Structures are given as structure tokens and as C-alpha cells.
């Protein structure tokens, strides 16, 4: 009976750790968007591992801290306003590694033009020294269109499939 109780306690401790890790990964993703929304671009590279990668398709790529710093310094030069809203963040944890996906809805202003954006993030996470970080962050844009044009044009709807 004592062994059964010990096994049940160990299983519960494992489940609690998984829940803690999932929440830590969600907090990491939310922190990223807080930094974007508040213009704290210089804090974003620290959310990645030293060899972290970013692939935002036609928006750009970065490998390692130096390129991440350069990439996010460029955001403030490109966008005069940006607010991102994250949806349906699903995470999986396997020990000190994890994966996640989430959906993005954003509003931005570039060169005086308002844009609507929709995309999907696919992430890989790693726990280093007890802290979760992005190992890779990939963005698949569904559409980035001027607000005045709208997104409901047939060619744009096919892009998201």
C-alpha cells in the first residue's frame, strides 16, 4: 500500500511539473508579444537560446544572438505601430524540450499605412539553467494586407490553405 501511495504521489508530482512547464512556455510566448507591443525589442533576443533561430519567411530570418539583435532592431525602423494578439497557444513538453503553436492576429502601421496581419507561430523550446527559452520560432504568414484593401480577396484566401 505504501508503494502504491508513493507511485501515485510521484505521478502527481510529474503531472504538476508538466503543468508548470506548460504555463512557463505560455508565459514565454506572452512575454515575447508584450515586448513587441510595448516596443521593448532589445529584450527579445534574451528570450532565445544563444544559437536560437527565427524564420519569418519573407519578413526575414536570424540565426544566433547577433542576428536576432539586428533583426529586432530593424522592427522599430519598419513599423511605427504594432499590436499583436495571440490565440490558441498549444504546448507540448518532453522533459527539457517542448514545442508549441499559436495563431497571430496583428495590427501595424508601416510608412503611414495600416495593415491587418494573420499568421501561425511554430516554436521549439529548451530549458536551460532552469529557464525556458525559444530554440526556434517560425512564422507562417496567412496574410499581411493594407486595411483599406481588406483580406477577403480570393487570392489571399487561397494563401492561408
Image (tube, rainbow, N blue to C red):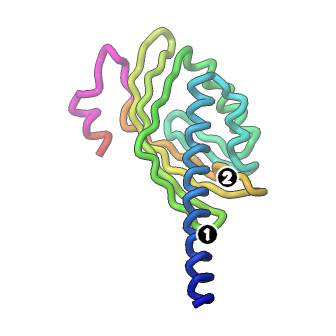
* Labelled pair 2, 1 in contact (Cβ < 8 Å): no
**As drawn, which residue projects farthest toward the front?**
1
x, y percent for residue 35: 62, 30
Q: Is residue 66 left or right of residue 100?
A: right
* Crowd around label 2: few <14 · some 14–19 · many ≥20 (10 Å): many
Left or right? Give the position of 99 relative to 72: left
Q: What secondary structure is marked by label 1?
A: helix
Using the rendered view, name the quadrant where residue 115 is placed.
top left
- From the viewer's perspective, tell me whether residue 57 is left or right of residue 145: right
Q: Earlier in the sequence, mark 2 or mark 1?
A: 1
User: In which quadrant of the rendered view does residue 93 lie?
Assistant: bottom right
Q: What range of the chain is rendered magenta? A: 144-157
Of 2 and 64, the residue lying toward us: 2
Q: CA distance from mark 2 to mark 1?
A: 19 Å
Q: Position of residue 117 (x, y in %)?
A: 40, 29
**Where is residue 120 shown, x and y percent of the image?**
43, 43
Is 156 in the magenta? yes
Measuring 55% from the left and 59% from the top, which residue is drawn there?
19
Q: Which residue is mark 2?
A: 132
User: Residue, x 59% and y 43% (percent of image)?
Assistant: 27
Question: Residue at the location (57% across, 36% down)?
Answer: 60
Which quarter of the rendering shows the N terminus? bottom right
Rendered image quadrant of residue 76: top right
Q: Nearer the viewer, mark 2 or mark 1?
A: 1
Crowding at mark 1 (Cα within 10 Å: few <14, some 14-19, many 20+):
few
Residue highlighted by disc 1: 13
Which residue is at a point 60% across and 37% down the rendered structure image?
32
Relative to residue 126, is residue 111 drawn left or right? Answer: left
Amino acid at each position: 500500500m505504501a508503494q502504491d501511495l508513493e507511485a501515485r504521489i510521484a505521478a502527481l508530482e510529474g503531472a504538476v511539473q508538466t503543468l508548470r512547464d506548460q504555463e512557463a512556455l505560455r508565459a514565454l510566448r506572452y512575454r515575447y508579444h508584450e515586448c513587441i507591443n510595448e516596443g521593448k525589442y532589445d529584450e527579445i533576443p534574451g528570450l532565445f537560446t544563444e544559437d536560437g533561430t527565427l524564420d519569418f519567411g519573407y519578413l526575414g530570418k536570424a540565426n544566433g544572438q547577433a542576428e536576432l539583435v539586428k533583426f529586432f532592431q530593424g522592427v522599430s525602423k519598419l513599423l511605427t505601430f504594432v499590436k499583436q494578439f495571440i490565440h490558441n497557444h498549444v504546448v507540448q513538453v518532453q522533459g527539457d524540450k517542448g514545442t508549441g503553436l499559436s495563431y497571430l492576429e496583428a495590427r501595424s502601421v508601416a510608412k503611414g499605412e495600416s495593415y491587418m496581419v494573420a499568421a501561425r507561430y511554430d516554436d521549439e523550446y529548451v530549458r536551460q539553467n532552469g529557464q525556458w527559452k525559444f530554440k526556434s520560432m517560425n512564422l507562417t504568414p496567412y496574410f499581411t494586407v493594407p486595411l483599406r484593401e481588406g483580406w477577403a480577396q480570393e487570392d489571399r484566401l487561397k494563401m492561408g490553405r
